[in-house]
Image (spheres, rainbow, N blue to C red):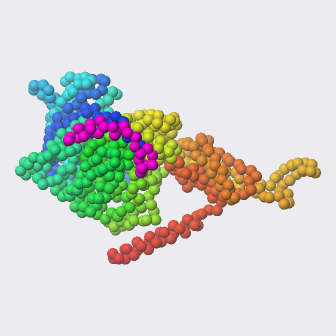
């Protein structure tokens, strides 16, 4: 049964419309209704040969492209991503230098010592328009363009003029011949020794919308954006080398010294592949009571063969929980790649294929390979199926997926902080330091870099050194805040509705916000204006607390008439006045609870809309003093950048905390020294 047939059977069953209980999530989950297939307007037939000794690709492709917009176009635009590493004048390398906050770019990428064969380039030798006799040669008029920064040295976007405009609904066939040099890994594509991982390796048509071409140069802070279609690809590699690729393997052809592997990927928007003679292959299967089965193929490095079950467990957990929460994975196959050591290709997603990442010594509960496997498998949903524009709105997939990864990890794979000793070779698991969901979201780095960019800014324009904080961490933290504010059942329904409605489509941020408002039954514009259209931060704190005996001072009535009193009368119980001042230190606003606890156990909870710069609460005539004040005690506002100022205590607990942490770290230090002594 082909992939397309399998998908039609799935969509055609009653499964897609059924409401099923999810025992793991604790809520009732509705799988997406009418999970439609893609427009299928960008299709490729590709033949390519890899010469591993020269690190060269020789390829020919026919692009069958249909105009699905409402206006004609007189040109096509092709991405040539490998030209980002053609020389140091490319936009990608210029931006990488701008964002290289950890050291000299020539040192981190070894640009000063890279031999010629370790750079990358893509050279289009011919572009022809098929359909006529003879084909029309478009090569002479094709030109590189730089619409984003005007960099005339950039060669990552090729404009191909057409002799006749392509009308809405019409189709053209473009034949492209090209050569490409595979670099030593840049941006998780390239080669190391006899391991090749090849992504964004072929001339690829950009996306045309009703608002024009969404065709950007290749930027250091962004990934990719493409239309869905069918990829029929024939990969010629040395005989005996294993191949993993997007889609389903259809067979091989023996050419003597080489073998041609054919793969077919349908309703996907990218084709990536890998090959090496060293891969160890393992297979498994995902099965579930009401989600469709998936055949799992894992290509491992030999030294990691013992971790195969951990890769499969993390992939199964992702397919289960994402499937229960959002909707089913519609393909019947998924390939997992364990990249070669220091290949730089780990932790990346492509349709029906992803790269994980691990080490030879990797204890359980260290978060790896489980964390990266869950995250990249999760991208099969948020990127693979919901095809957002990663050039402009990368948070729509990376942020949602980071949030979802943390949820799966907290349920299935408890994680603890891990130190890497002796040059990173020996791991040391610190069991006294569990990693929380907020920690997995990246709260620590968000606190430092929260104001680096406004998320509404197109992603390709983010500052290169801090773009990940806004794309991944800020989004995950505001989704965490929404979960705590609205409740998981409501947020789950928002995400599953969004997934159902926009699978195999290209949604925008406004589409997500509209779904959130619709499903929650609330106008959340005030929230999205702050977390998306602003770089303002949230920070609420306790400014001052006074809780003192309250003598009555001044004139009061008495049997003797009007008398002056400045202290309690004899025998009268002491009463206390408590004054609490809370303050909004950040520019962003959010409703928070303020809880005041008194020595007699009484507790007062105030609901503050959080809009004023400060608010004072006064409690007169109380029988006891205040012992603590907490703002947002349930920590609903996960975005608060300084949670240490959210509380006040009459008796500081610093000494107790210091004693506890001192004992913990002394124990750790003792174990570390004993370990060191063993080795030396």
Q: Would you place residue 333 above or below residue 79 in this image?
A: below
What quarter of the picture does the C terminus occupy? bottom left
The residue shown at (53%, 68%) is 660
Judge left or right: residue 591 versus residue 424: right
Say which of 28 and 239 sits in front: 28
Q: Position of residue 50 (x, y in %)?
A: 14, 48
Examine the rendered structure and indicate whether residue 42 appears above or below residue 423. Answer: above
In which quadrant will I find the N terminus? Answer: top left
Residue under the image location 24 percent in, 29 percent down = 66
The residue stretch that appears in magenta? 1-28
Query: Can you see residue 66?
Result: yes
Magenta highlight on residue 280: no
Picture residue at 18% right of the left edge, 39% below the top: 232
Magenta-colored stretch includes residue 14: yes
Q: Position of residue 325 (x, y in %)?
A: 40, 45
Q: Is residue 246 above or below residue 435?
A: above
Report the residue that reaches farthest toward the left: 256
Residue in view at x 35 percent, y 77 percent:
678
Can you see residue 454?
no
**In this rendering, position of residue 650 left or right of residue 73:** right
Q: How many marks?
A: 0
Which residue is at the front of the view, 433 or 8? Answer: 8
Q: Name the spot of residue 477 as percent of width and height, x first.
A: 46, 47
Q: Is residue 634 left or right of residue 363?
A: right
Query: Where in the figure is residue 652, as x and y percent of width and height?
Result: 62, 62
Q: In the picture, residue 501 is in which quadrant?
A: top left
């Amino acid at each position: 049964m082909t992939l397309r047939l399998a998908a039609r059977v799935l969509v055609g069953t009653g499964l897609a419309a059924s409401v099923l209980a999810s025992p793991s999530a604790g809520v009732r989950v509705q799988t997406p209704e009418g999970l439609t297939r893609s427009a299928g307007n960008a299709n490729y037939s590709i033949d390519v040969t890899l010469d591993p000794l020269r690190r060269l690709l020789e390829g020919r492709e026919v692009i069958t492209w249909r105009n699905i917009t409402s206006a004609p176009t007189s040109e096509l635009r092709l991405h040539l991503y490998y030209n980002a590493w053609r020389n140091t004048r490319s936009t990608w390398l210029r931006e990488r230098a701008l964002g290289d906050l950890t050291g000299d770019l020539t040192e981190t990428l070894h640009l000063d010592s890279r031999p010629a064969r370790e750079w990358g380039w893509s050279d289009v030798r011919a572009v022809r328009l098929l359909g006529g006799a003879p084909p029309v040669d478009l090569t002479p008029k094709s030109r590189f363009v730089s619409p984003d920064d005007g960099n005339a040295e950039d060669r990552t976007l090729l404009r191909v003029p057409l002799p006749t405009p392509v009308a809405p609904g019409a189709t053209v066939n473009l034949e492209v011949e090209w050569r490409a040099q595979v670099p030593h890994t840049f941006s998780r594509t390239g080669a190391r020794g006899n391991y090749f991982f090849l992504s964004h390796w072929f001339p690829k048509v950009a996306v045309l919308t009703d608002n024009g071409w969404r065709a950007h140069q290749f930027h250091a802070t962004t990934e990719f954006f493409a239309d869905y279609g069918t990829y029929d690809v024939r990969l010629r590699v040395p005989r005996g080398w294993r191949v993993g690729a997007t889609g389903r393997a259809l067979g091989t052809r023996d050419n003597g010294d080489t073998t041609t592997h054919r793969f077919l990927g349908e309703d996907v928007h990218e084709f990536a592949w890998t090959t090496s003679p060293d891969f160890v292959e393992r297979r498994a299967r995902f099965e579930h009571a009401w989600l469709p089965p998936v055949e799992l193929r894992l290509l491992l490095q030999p030294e990691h063969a013992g971790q195969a079950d951990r890769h499969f467990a993390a992939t199964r957990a992702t397919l289960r929980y994402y499937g229960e929460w959002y909707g089913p994975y519609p393909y019947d196959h998924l390939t997992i790649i364990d990249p070669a050591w220091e290949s730089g290709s780990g932790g990346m997603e492509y349709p029906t294929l992803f790269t994980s990442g691990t080490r030879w010594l990797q204890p359980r509960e260290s978060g790896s390979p489980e964390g990266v496997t869950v995250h990249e498998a999760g991208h099969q949903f948020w990127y693979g199926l919901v095809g957002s524009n990663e050039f402009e709105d990368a948070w729509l997939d990376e942020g949602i997926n980071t949030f979802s990864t943390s949820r799966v990890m907290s349920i299935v794979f408890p994680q603890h902080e891990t130190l890497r000793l002796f040059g990173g070779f020996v791991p040391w698991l610190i069991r006294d330091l569990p990693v929380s969901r907020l920690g997995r979201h990246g709260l620590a780095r968000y606190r430092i870099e929260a104001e680096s960019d406004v998320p509404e800014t197109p992603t390709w324009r983010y500052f290169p050194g801090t773009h990940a904080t806004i794309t991944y961490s800020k989004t995950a933290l505001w989704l965490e805040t929404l979960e705590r504010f609205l409740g998981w059942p409501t947020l789950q329904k928002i995400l599953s509705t969004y997934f159902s409605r926009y699978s195999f489509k290209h949604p925008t941020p406004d589409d997500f916000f509209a779904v959130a408002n619709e499903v929650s039954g609330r106008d959340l514009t005030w929230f999205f204006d702050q977390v998306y259209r602003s770089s303002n931060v949230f920070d609420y704190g306790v400014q001052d607390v006074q809780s003192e005996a309250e003598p009555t001072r001044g004139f009061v009535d008495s049997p003797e008439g009007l008398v002056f009193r400045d202290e309690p009368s004899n025998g009268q119980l002491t009463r206390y006045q408590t004054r609490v001042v809370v303050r909004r230190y950040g520019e962003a606003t959010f409703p928070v609870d303020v809880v005041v606890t008194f020595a007699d156990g009484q507790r007062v909870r105030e609901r503050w809309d959080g809009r004023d710069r400060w608010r004072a609460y006064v409690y007169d005539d109380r029988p006891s003093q205040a012992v603590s004040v907490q703002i947002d005690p349930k920590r609903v506002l996960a975005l608060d950048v300084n949670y240490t100022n959210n509380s006040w205590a009459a008796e500081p607990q610093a000494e107790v905390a210091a004693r506890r942490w001192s004992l913990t770290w002394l124990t750790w230090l003792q174990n570390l020294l004993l370990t060191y002594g063993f080795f030396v």
